[in-house]
Image: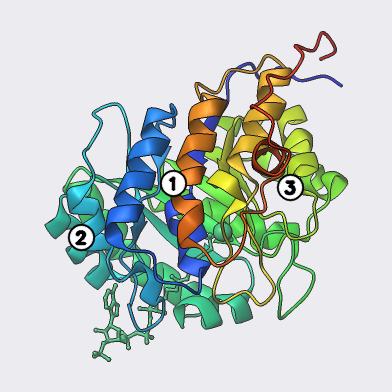
């Protein structure tokens, strides 16, 4: 295995991608305590919520209250999802300094998720991105269904590239390439990533793997081999998308950090503190968190384990 990446940036999406998909209502205070603990664990980018329509995703209806009351750590960025100008206005009112806009590589998913075709989503986002930038707000882009669509099946890598390039043209500093329903496999990841890297530098790409079929960590390794160094993950493996049937949690942040620690790749995240953060949110859910490292710590009643440092890289 040949990996030249020595530092990875983790974008923690648990408080947004995770909690948006939970059936139970998690109180704002618990979300704030969770986000604070994630910052204490060393995460420097924590997606705090979504200014989407509360009719579409009621779990994110309290993002305004949550965002305003996070004790902001000056070293931490707290992006929020914004689907349209109304969302941006709410975000600006709350004092947000970083947003994420989101579209997809497949038409049917996009229609179900934001009620827009791909082209319509770009018409919608162009003024949103421009206005955000006028206010000094950083804009990240997401491309969903990059490795498969729950409605259309296969997605052409060329379409993924086209949508990534259009998001970068709007001024996104980075595009997160999403395996929304967790169908991707490592060779496919390397194929899609290889095509993107012919046009887009690695530093402007992130990978966003859901672990629905257990391939998220293998896919991460495949992307690391290609030189990708930014990964989205959610504490405890919380997550899913309400408009992607069968989508389950994101790659668990603990599992990612455990693997990176074992490969001597720096992430700045303290595993013990991360487990403590997941343990804050776990009691509010109606199911155990699926993250493997977390389960090994809690079910196995063992203290967290530091991976043996690996000489093989
Ligand atoms: P629509 O129904 O077509 O829009 O929804 P509309 O303009 O007709 O608005 C409907 C109602 O919502 C109106 O209220 C609007 O005012 C209100 P009413 O007049 O009926 O009382 N509204 C809003 N309220 C608050 N904030 C807003 C807002 N916008 C409209 N921003 C819309 C279109 C885009 C709004 C809707 O489809 C939506 O909010 N979708 C978001 C869905 C979502 O959050 N999905 C999950 C996130 S994406 C994801 O998880 C994937 C990702 O993780 C990457 C991956 O895994 O691939 C990022
Ligand atoms: Mg997602």
Question: Marks 1/2: CA distance?
Answer: 19 Å
User: Which of pointers 1 and 3 indicates the residue nearer the eye?
Assistant: 1
Between the residue at mark 3 and the residue at mark 2, the CA separation in whole angstroms equals: 32 Å
Instruction: Give the residue number, with chain letter if any, for mark 1.
Output: 280
Label 2: few (<14), some (14–19) or many (≥20) C-alpha neighbours in 10 Å: few
Q: Nearer the viewer, mark 1 or mark 2?
A: 1
Q: Quadrant of residue 223?
A: top right
The picture quadrant where one finds residue 50 is: bottom left
User: What residue sits 51% from the left and 53% below the top?
Assistant: 282
Residue named by callout 3: 216
Q: Is residue 96 above or below residue 293?
A: below
Identify residue for label 2: 65
Q: CA distance from mark 1 to mark 3?
A: 24 Å
Element assignment for label 3: helix
* Earlier sequence position, callout 1 versus callout 3: 3
Instruction: Name the colouring of the figure.
Output: rainbow
Q: What residue is at 54 percent from the left and 74 percent from the top?
A: 242
| View extreme (front): residue | 301
Q: Residue 106 at what x, y percent from top left?
A: 64, 72
Q: Quick one: quadrant of the C terminus?
A: top right
Q: Is residue 307 above or below residue 110?
A: above
């Amino acid at each position: 295995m040949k990996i030249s990446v020595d530092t990875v940036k983790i974008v923690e999406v648990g408080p947004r991608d995770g909690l948006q998909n939970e059936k139970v209502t998690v109180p704002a205070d618990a979300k704030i305590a969770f986000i604070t603990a994630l910052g204490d664990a060393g995460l420097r980018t924590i997606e705090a919520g979504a200014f989407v329509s509360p009719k579409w995703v009621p779990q994110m209806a309290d993002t305004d209250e949550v965002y305003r009351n996070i004790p902001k750590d000056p070293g931490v960025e707290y992006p929020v999802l914004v689907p349209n100008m109304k969302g941006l206005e709410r975000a600006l009112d709350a004092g947000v300094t970083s947003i994420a806009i989101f579209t997809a590589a497949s038409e049917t998913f996009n229609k179900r998720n934001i009620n827009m075709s791909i082209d319509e989503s770009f018409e919608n986002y162009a003024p949103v991105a421009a206005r955000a930038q006028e206010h000094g707000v950083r804009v990240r882009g997401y491309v969903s269904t990059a490795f498969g669509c729950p409605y259309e099946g296969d997605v052409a890598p060329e379409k993924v590239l086209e949508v990534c390039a259009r998001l970068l043209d709007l001024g996104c500093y980075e595009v997160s390439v999403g395996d929304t329903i967790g169908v991707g496999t490592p060779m496919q990841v390397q194929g899609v990533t290889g095509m993107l890297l012919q046009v887009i530098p690695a530093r402007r790409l992130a990978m966003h793997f859901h672990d629905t079929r257990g391939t998220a960590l293998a896919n991460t390794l495949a992307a690391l081999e290609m030189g990708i160094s930014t990964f989205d993950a959610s504490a405890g493996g919380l997550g899913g998308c309400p408009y992607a049937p069968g989508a389950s949690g994101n790659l668990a942040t603990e599992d990612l950090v455990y693997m990176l620690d074992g490969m001597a790749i720096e992430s700045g995240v303290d595993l013990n503190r991360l487990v403590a953060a997941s343990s804050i949110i776990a009691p509010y859910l109606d199911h155990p968190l699926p993250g493997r490292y977390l389960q090994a710590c809690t079910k196995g009643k063992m203290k967290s384990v530091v991976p043996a440092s690996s000489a093989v890289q």
